Amino acid sequence: VQLVESGGGLVQPGGSLRLSCAASGFTFSYFAMSWYRQAPGKERELVAAITSAGGSPNYADSVKGRFTISRDNAKNTVYLQMNSLKPDDTAVYYCRARRIGYGVDYWGKGTLVTVSS
């Protein structure tokens, strides 16, 4: 089982990034997917989540209207489009896969996003 995040990097405030999380080793379409982040000295927090079928996306209040989660079950990939980035968005971003009701839970190793001028 692997979840591999990519797309992080250094971006100026107001800029955009698109994170990707490529999944392998399990049936991706059975799993709800989510993005979490952890800033230095802070706890990991939920950023966005999407159901196995790609519906009902939900977002942390701090990113609503700026971030969009989506998935492509044919490519076994989930995305996080991040617009209007702020310095407070600086964190390591993690991808999570959960099969609801089965107790199966996978995490990626994260990708660093730094928002700074």
Image (spheres, rainbow, N blue to C red):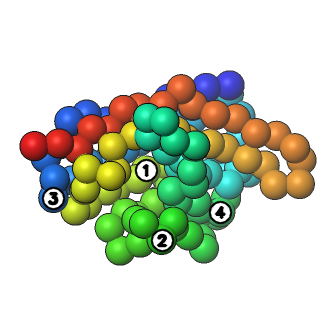
Label placed on residue 51: 4
Secondary structure category for the residue under label 4: loop
Label pair 1/3, CB-CB below 8 angstroms: no
Would residue 1 appear left or right of 113 to someone viewing this image?
Answer: right
Please rate how many residues cluster around mark 4, counting C-alpha atoms within 10 Å: few if below 14, some from 14 to 19, many from 20.
many
Label placed on residue 14: 3
Could you say where residue 42 lies in the image, as x and y percent from the top left? Answer: 52, 42
Residue position for label 1: 79
Q: Nearer the viewer, residue 78 or 93?
A: 93
Label pair 1/2, CB-CB below 8 angstroms: no
Name the residue located 57 percent from the left edge and 50 percent from the top edge: 45
CA distance for labels 3 and 4: 29 Å
- Specify the amino acid type for callout 4: Thr
**N-terminal-most mark, 1 or 3:** 3
In which quadrant of the rendered view does residue 93 lie? top left
Foreground disc of the pair 2, 4: 2
Label placed on residue 61: 2
**N-terminal-most mark, 1 or 2:** 2
